[in-house]
Amino acid sequence: MLTWVLAYTVYHYVEQTRLTELEKIMLKTSMREAEAKVLRAQLNPHFTFNALNSIRALVSEDPTKAQQSITQLSNLLRNSLLADRRKTVELREELKTVEDYLQLEKVRYEERLNYDIQAVPQTLSWQVPPMMLQTLVENGIKHGVSKLPKGGKLSVESSIENNELIICIKNTGTLGNTDSGGVGLLNTAERLSILYGKEASFRIYQESQSTVCSEIIIPMLSDGLARYNDQIPDRTPAQ
Amino acid sequence: MKTLIIDDERLARNELKRLLEPFHKIEIVGEAANAEEALTLIDELQPELLFLDIQMPGKNGFELLTSIEGKAPDVIFTTAYDDYAIKAFEFNALDYLLKPIDSERLKDAIQRVEEDRHIQGESNTDERPERASRVLDENDKVFVKDGEKCWFVKLGKIRLFESMGNYVRLHFDDQKPLVLKSLNSLEDRLDPENYFRANRKHIINLEWIEKIEPWFSGGLLVTLQGGDRIEISRRQAIRFKELMSL
C-alpha cells in the first residue's frame, strides 16, 4: 500500500514538474504572441484619410470608381483588423490586399504611380504573415513615389528558390533619403523571427541607381509550425 | 480674396474647390501641384490666401513658405493626418484643416482669416492700388521658421535685422530667429521709408528708434526700444540725417 502511495506521489510530482515546464513554454509563447500582435501593421491613418478624401471627390466625378474604391478600402480595413487573428495567410490573399491598396493609391497619385504584381503560380498557396507585404509596399510608396514630384514605379515579384519563398518589392527611389530603420521595418524583421526563426530573412538594398528593393525570404511552413498554428488557442491578452 | 490651392493630389484640389464654391468672397485664382508651381503662381498672381497641403513631394509646405521672396499671404494648412505636422501647427498656433475637410470647420477658418484681415484694414482689397509688390512695408507679413518654431510676423514688429554670415537674425518681441537670406537681398525688399541700412551688419526699423546720439568719426549711435544700440556709419549718417531732416 505504502509503495503504491509512494509511487503515485513520485509520479504525481514528476508529472507536475513536466506540466509546469510546458506551462512555462506556453506562457512564454503567449507573451510572444501578444508582442507579435502589437507588432502587426495597423492601417496607416495618413493613407486612410487621404483615401477617404479622394473617394469623396470621386463621388461626383466618377461614382462607379467611388463605389469600387469604397469596397477596396473596406477590404483593407477588414484585413488589417483580421491580421490579429491569424498567424499566416495564403500569398494569394495577401496579394489581393496589396492590389486593393495599390488601386487606392493609384486613385490618389494617378499617372504618378505605375505598379505591377508578378507572382509565380506555385507561390500563391505559400503561407505568409498577414499584412507584412502590405506594410512593405506602403513603405515603398512612402519613400518612393510620394517623395518624387514625377512619381515612379512599384513592383511586387514572388518566386521559389531552394524550397524558400522569395518576395521582392521594388520601388523607384533611393535609400539615402529613406529612413530604412523605420519602426514598420523593424517589426517586419521581428515578426519573421518570431514565426520562422533564423530561416527567414529580410533586407532592403539599393538595387540600381533609382530602384530600392525590399526582399523577404520565407521558408515553407514546417509541420511543427503548422500544428502550432492550429493548436494554440487565440487568446486576447488579459486587460 | 484671391486664393490659391496647393496640393499634389488632383482629387484633393477638386474637393476643396467644391467646398469653396458657396464662399463668394473666395476667388480661386489658381492651383499648384507642388512648391515650384506654387512659387511661380504666388509671384505672378499675388494671392491673399493659400490653402496649403503640408505633405508634398519635393519641398514641403513650410519650405515653400520660407522660399517666398515677397510678403507671405494668409495660410490655411491642410493635412490628412500627420503627427509631426499637427504638432507643429498646434505649437505655433497655425490654422489647419484635416482632410476630408469638414465644411463647418472650413467656414470657421475662413472667418478667422477675414477677421484678421479686417483688423489690419486690408478687407477692401479693391481699393488698394496695385503697388509694385516688390517693396514690403510694415503691415506685410513674412513667414519665418527656425527649427521647430515658426511665425507669420508683421514686418513692423521687426525692429532690427542683423547679418550673421549667410543668415540674418530677425529681432522682434523676445525672439531672435535666423533666416537664410542675405542682408542685401532683404534691403532690396524693404520700404526705405521705414527701414534703414545703418551699417554693414544692420538694418534698423526707424519706427523703433528711441534715441539718437552723435558718435565717433561723424557717425551716430541709435538706441532702439528694447535696448539694442546700433552704430550708424559716417557715410550712412549723412543719408540718415537727410532722411530724418535733421
Image: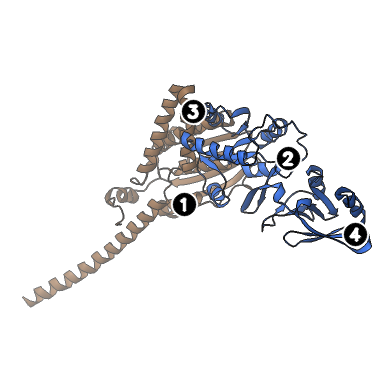
Chain colours: A brown, B blue
Quarter of the image holding residue B133?
A: top right
The residue tagged 3 is A57
The residue tagged 1 is A187
Give SS at disc 2.
Answer: loop
- Residues B164 and A129: in front is B164
- Label 3 – label 1 distance at C-alpha: 34 Å
Give SS at disc 3.
Answer: helix
Task: Give the number of the mark in front: 3 or 4.
Answer: 4
Image marks 3 and 1: residues in contact by CB distance under 8 Å: no
- Residues B40 and A200: in front is B40
Task: Give the number of the mark in front: 3 or 1.
Answer: 3
- Percent across and percent down for residue A223 are 33, 48
The residue tagged 2 is B70
Q: Is residue A59 left or right of residue A155?
A: left
> Which mark is first along the chain, 4 or 2?
2
> Which mark is first along the chain, 1 or 3?
3
Task: Give the number of the mark in front: 2 or 1.
Answer: 2
In the rendered image, residues at marks 3 and 4 fall on the same chain: no
Task: Give the number of the mark in front: 2 or 3.
Answer: 2
- Amino acid under disc 2: Gly
In the rendered image, residues at marks 3 and 1 fall on the same chain: yes
As displayed, is residue B216 above or below residue A159?
Answer: below
In the rendered image, residues at marks 2 and 3 fall on the same chain: no
- Residues B177 and B230: in front is B230
